[in-house]
Image (cartoon, coloured by chain):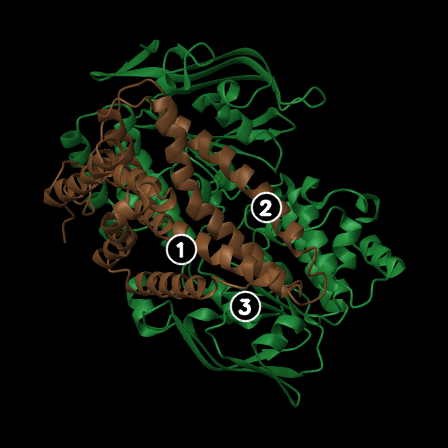
Chain colours: A green, B brown
């Protein structure tokens, strides 16, 4: 049993998580956690925030036991979770107390259908099937998830996957819930639903630990916030203190300051130098999944050239599919793009439009950064390729393997090959998902640089700060989604 | 509307029956055991997987499978005598297709219709150690992931103009494998971490919410499989 702390009426309250001077290193060179001392009581909601690489994910991994049981490294000090020393017990025993929702929903499901996924944790603990059935029914009805049951995980949108991930933890009888950057792939409505989940856990007196850099949506719930940098807790805020910080102060700490708001009412601040007013016109784009009604229908869309265009809309509205159709990857979509007097069909658009995908790993193929750029050129030209790398601060990595670089660097390599291809229209699918403030600014600068070079940049995103910083035009996607789609969102 | 979980949802066959059928199909269709003597069973086992697909309402996959099978069967019959080197290579390929296709379709049917949890429970009842069944269930889970990743990579290659028949056609295979292996290994690691934080471990008793039991069709299929082996045994040892 955990150590008794104090009594509130008849309820006993315990120390749930205790870090006693904990340090951890994944590799010899770099210390990821330095002398962490921390006590979290039962029923607290604690936010761990800080820029990318500050050690917040490492900290929560110490609580769910992945450190030291799964990720190897050198650990000193002692983490006590629910009264037991985390390093001396097993992951399985810890998992009865701690449930984790991970950042990337694509890799946290063990089952292929949603219903089994909700049951998975309880089945592993050997609970009676009748009890599990009851738990599932109550969670599904409480959060109105009936529509998502008995579906294939692979047919869900990112936001729906995250909902199932949260629900599957809610079914388990755990005391501690850990959320590791849960909002990275969520839009405004997705975040609202995440909030309902958190409210449910608070009602059930769970202890909640959240690692995040988008923080404002958590303000109503947290009891305190810990700010980390370089593996240390550098400051502790009460809920009231962190709420009173201004946007500039939060951004100075490397945090996302955006207030929760609908992306359609965003005011653009990017300086809007007049472009020459040329437009391309997209004609007759419609897309439907096999045997279903169309997801969206665009009879005609005017897209200004030489601008940074933000396409905004809810999760699952078909924005990513729109980009795939726009660059000619969906065979079933027979749209035309009119530029000047030319009409581009699918095949021509595949040759003329470049897309930087959300998961950049999928589009880097070769052994070296330089080669990656050179295969995109019409005729291979090493000096030109090196020049392009120079402008994107990648010259020193020319001989590195692209997959050995960091996420931001990989994205820049993809952009470098886009420039090398000489194509004038570049699409970005969620270029800033999961990025902290300074990395988001870097992407924003990169987009502006592309625009200055005369490229038309089209981005699909729900990152409000990116839209404010970079976009010169916003096109709400909602107007093109078909009626059936709108109903299912409501 | 209130949601109620139905624990009796399952596909036509029990996972144990499916595995027995897969084994039988491997022996008699791929392995061609018994040859002439088994001819009736052979044809039943060849068309049974397509029948199962139709029961799952996979009309398109079923008809494509039949068309490919019949096409390659008659083509390889036609290519029997006086062949050039190229033709005999083609004939060999077609012959291999007719041998392997039915079992591949059966395997696809099994992967698509069996829940991971059902599979683990069924294997547990057969007293198969979970040191074997958990890794196998991970492989089950991984098929659709690999297909999904491969599709995205293929899209990226088409977008960048690296296609069969276009520039760099020879490198296209290598370019495909490197990112596929890289992203599958990342997903694999994250997947095992997530499964372990939810209490998956070997050697521990786990429960299963799905009611699995043998039904009429199971007994029919099991009878079919057993008769295959018995008839084959009779042929080998008594005639």
Q: Which mark is first along the chain, 3 or 2?
A: 3
Q: How far from the left and from the top, in percent, is residue A291?
A: 32, 70
Seen at 63% across and 54% down, the residue is: A363
Q: CA distance from mark 2 to mark 3?
A: 27 Å
Q: Is residue A306 left or right of residue B234?
A: right
Looking at the picture, how far across and down is residue A370, in whole percent? 80, 51
The chain identifier of the residue carrying mark 1 reads B
Residue A43 pos. (x, y %): 33, 25
**Front residue of A326 and A276:** A326
Q: Which residue is mark 1?
A: B98
Q: Residues within 10 Å of mark 1 (few under 14, many from 20)?
A: many
Q: Which secondary structure lies at badge 1? A: helix
Discs 1 and 2 lie in a common subunit: no
- The answer to whether A469 appears left or right of A15 in the picture is right
**Residue receiving disc 2:** A435
One can see residue A356 in this view? no
Taking the spot 30% from the left edge, 33% from the top edge, the residue there is: A120
Residue under the point 46% across and 58% down: B94
Q: Quick one: label 3, few (<14), some, or many (20+) residues within 10 Å?
A: many
Residue at numbered disc 3: A329
Residue at 20% of width from left, 44% of height from top? Answer: B13
Residue A412 vertical position relative to residue A212 in the rendered view, above or below? below
Report the Cα–Cα distance between label 3 and label 1: 33 Å
Query: In the rendered image, which quarter contains the C terminus of chain A?
Result: bottom left
Q: Is residue A237 visible?
A: yes
Q: Nearer the viewer, residue B40 or A125?
A: B40
C-alpha gap between disc 1 and disc 2 = 51 Å
Determine the residue located farthest toward the bottom in the rendered image. A341
Q: Look at discs 1 and 2 and give the one toward the viewer.
A: 1
Residue A308 drawn at (x, y percent): 64, 68
Subunit bearing disc 3? A
């Amino acid at each position: 049993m955990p150590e008794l702390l104090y009594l509130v009426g008849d309820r006993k309250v315990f120390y749930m998580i205790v870090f006693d001077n904990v340090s951890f290193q994944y590799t010899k060179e770099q210390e990821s956690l330095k002398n962490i001392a921390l006590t979290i009581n039962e029923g607290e909601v604690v936010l761990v925030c800080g820029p990318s690489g500050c050690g917040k994910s490492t900290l929560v991994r110490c609580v769910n036991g992945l450190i030291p049981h799964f990720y190897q490294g050198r650990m000193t000090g002692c983490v006590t979770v629910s009264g037991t020393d985390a390093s001396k017990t097993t992951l399985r025993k810890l998992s009865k107390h701690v449930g984790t929702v991970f950042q990337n929903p694509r890799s946290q499901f063990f089952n292929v259908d949603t219903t089994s996924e909700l049951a998975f944790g309880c089945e592993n603990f050997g609970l009676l099937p009748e009890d599990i059935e009851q738990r599932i029914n109550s969670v599904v009805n409480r959060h109105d998830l009936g529509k998502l049951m008995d579906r294939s995980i692979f047919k869900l949108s990112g936001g729906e996957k995250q909902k199932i991930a949260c629900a599957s933890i809610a079914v388990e009888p755990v005391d501690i819930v850990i959320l590791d950057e849960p909002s990275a792939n969520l839009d405004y409505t997705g975040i609202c639903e995440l909030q309902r989940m958190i409210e449910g856990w608070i009602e059930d007196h769970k202890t909640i630990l959240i690692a995040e850099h988008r923080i404002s949506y958590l303000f109503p719930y947290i009891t305190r916030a810990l700010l980390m940098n370089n593996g240390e807790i550098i400051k502790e805020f009460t809920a009231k203190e962190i709420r009173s910080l201004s946007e500039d102060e939060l951004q100075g700490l490397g945090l996302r300051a955006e207030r929760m708001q609908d992306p359609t009412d965003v005011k653009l601040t990017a300086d809007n130098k007049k472009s020459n007013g040329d437009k391309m016109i997209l004609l007759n784009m419609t897309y439907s999944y096999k045997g279903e009604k169309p997801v969206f229908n665009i009879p005609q869309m005017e897209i200004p050239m030489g601008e940074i265009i933000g396409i905004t809309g809810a999760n699952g509205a078909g924005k990513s599919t729109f980009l795939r159709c726009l660059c000619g990857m969906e065979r079933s979509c027979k749209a035309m793009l009119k530029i000047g007097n030319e009409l581009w069909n699918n095949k021509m658009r595949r040759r003329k439009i470049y897309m930087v995908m959300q998961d950049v790993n999928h589009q880097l193929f070769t052994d070296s950064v330089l080669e990656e750029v050179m295969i995109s050129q019409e005729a291979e030209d090493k000096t030109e390729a090196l020049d392009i790398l120079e402008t994107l601060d990648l010259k020193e990595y020319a001989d590195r393997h692209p997959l050995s670089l960091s996420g931001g660097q990989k994205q820049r390599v993809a952009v470098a090959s886009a420039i090398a291809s000489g194509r004038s229209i570049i699409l970005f699918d969620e270029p800033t998902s999961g990025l902290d403030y300074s990395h988001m600014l870097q992407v924003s600068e990169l987009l502006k640089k592309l625009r200055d070079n005369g490229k038309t940049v089209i981005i699909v995103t729900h990152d409000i700060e990116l839209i404010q910083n970079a976009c010169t035009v916003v096109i709400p996607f909602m107007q093109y989604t078909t009626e059936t789609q709108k109903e299912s969102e409501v | 509307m209130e949601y109620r979980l139905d624990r009796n949802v399952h596909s036509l066959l029990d996972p144990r029956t499916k595995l027995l059928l897969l084994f039988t199909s491997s022996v008699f269709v791929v392995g061609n055991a018994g040859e002439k003597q088994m001819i009736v069973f052979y044809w039943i086992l060849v068309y049974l997987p397509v029948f199962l697909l139709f029961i799952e309402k996979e009309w398109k996959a079923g008809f494509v499978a039949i068309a490919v099978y019949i096409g390659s069967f008659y083509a390889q019959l036609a290519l029997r005598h006086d062949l050039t080197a190229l033709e005999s290579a083609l004939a060999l390929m077609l012959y291999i297709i007719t041998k392997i296709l039915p079992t591949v379709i059966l395997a696809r049917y099994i992967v698509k219709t069996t829940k991971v949890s059902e599979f683990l429970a069924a294997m547990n009842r057969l007293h198969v150690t979970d040191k074997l069944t958990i890794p196998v269930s991970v492989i089950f889970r991984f098929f659709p992931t690999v297909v999904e990743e491969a599709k995205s990579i293929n899209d990226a290659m088409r977008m960048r103009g690296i296609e069969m028949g276009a520039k760099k056609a020879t490198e296209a295979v290598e370019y495909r494998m490197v990112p596929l292996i890289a992203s599958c290994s990342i997903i694999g690691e994250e997947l095992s971490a997530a499964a372990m934080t939810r209490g998956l471990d070997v050697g521990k008793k786990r429960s299963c919410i799905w009611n699995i039991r043998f039904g009429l069709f199971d007994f029919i299929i099991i009878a079919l499989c057993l008769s295959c082996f018995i008839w084959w045994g009779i042929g080998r040892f008594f005639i």
